[in-house]
Amino acid sequence: MGDFQRGDEDVIRFHDFQVDVQTYAQRGKQNDFPLLKRCPHCQAKRPLYRHGYYERNAVTSHQSYRIWIARYRCPECRRTVAVLPSFLLPYFQYTLPTIWRVVKERLGLTPKRGMEEAPLPYPSSLAV
Ligand SMILES: [Zn+2]
């Protein structure tokens, strides 16, 4: 933990890269990173420029990946934005489907043998 406590004030912007964690990890810095046209700090309508990358973990129930996160900087206010793939949650190393499965298990919502099956009022996917 503490991946995001780096002493700066990155704003986190989620982006759907249309790939899963494995593909994202394989592509590394060649992912299709979005263009940020507006600064979330000062609202300046000037494109943010790319400001490098940092590495973090993405852990599924099967495997652990090291993935690259792109950072951007605003030319006006000089503050930074990190673009995270939407399969991640900030402060968690685990991908969303993995977290979701663990939460359901903890809550006893995963049907087990011998237990009666309760209806699951949960969506099949989670919007961030
Ligand atoms: Zn700005």
Image (cartoon, grey):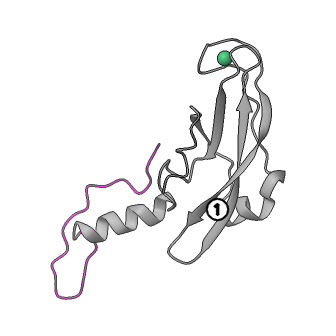
- At 84% from the left and 52% from the top, the residue drawn is 30
Q: Is residue 73 above or below residue 59?
A: above
Q: Nearer the viewer, residue 34 or 90?
A: 90
- At 53% from the left and 70% from the top, the residue drawn is 60
Left or right position of 119 against 79: left
Q: Is residue 93 above or below residue 16?
A: below
The range drawn in magenta is: 109-128
Residue 56 placement: quadrant: bottom right
Left or right position of 103 against 55: left
Q: Is residue 33 above or below residue 9?
A: below
Q: Is residue 103 in the magenta section?
A: no
Counting from the top left corner in percent of width and height, residue 117 is at 20, 74
Left or right position of 81 against 50: left
- At 38% from the left and 67% from the top, the residue drawn is 101
Q: Residue furthest front?
A: 7
Residue 28 placement: quadrant: bottom right
Counting from the top left corner in percent of width and height, residue 55 is at 69, 55
Q: Nearer the viewer, residue 28 or 110?
A: 28
Mark count: 1
10 Å neighbourhood of mark 1: few (<14), some, or many (≥20)? many
Q: Is residue 36 above or below residue 60?
A: above
Taken as a whole, is the magenta stretch helix, strand or loop?
Answer: loop
Q: Nearer the viewer, residue 116 or 49?
A: 49
- At 69% from the left and 59% from the top, the residue drawn is 67
Counting from the top left corner in percent of width and height, residue 77 is at 68, 15
**Ligand 1, image quadrant it occupies:** top right
SS at badge 1: helix
Q: Circle 1 sits on which residue?
A: 21
Counting from the top left corner in percent of width and height, residue 46 is at 76, 15
Q: Amino acid at mark 1?
A: Val
Q: Residue furthest right?
A: 30
Residue 22 placement: quadrant: bottom right
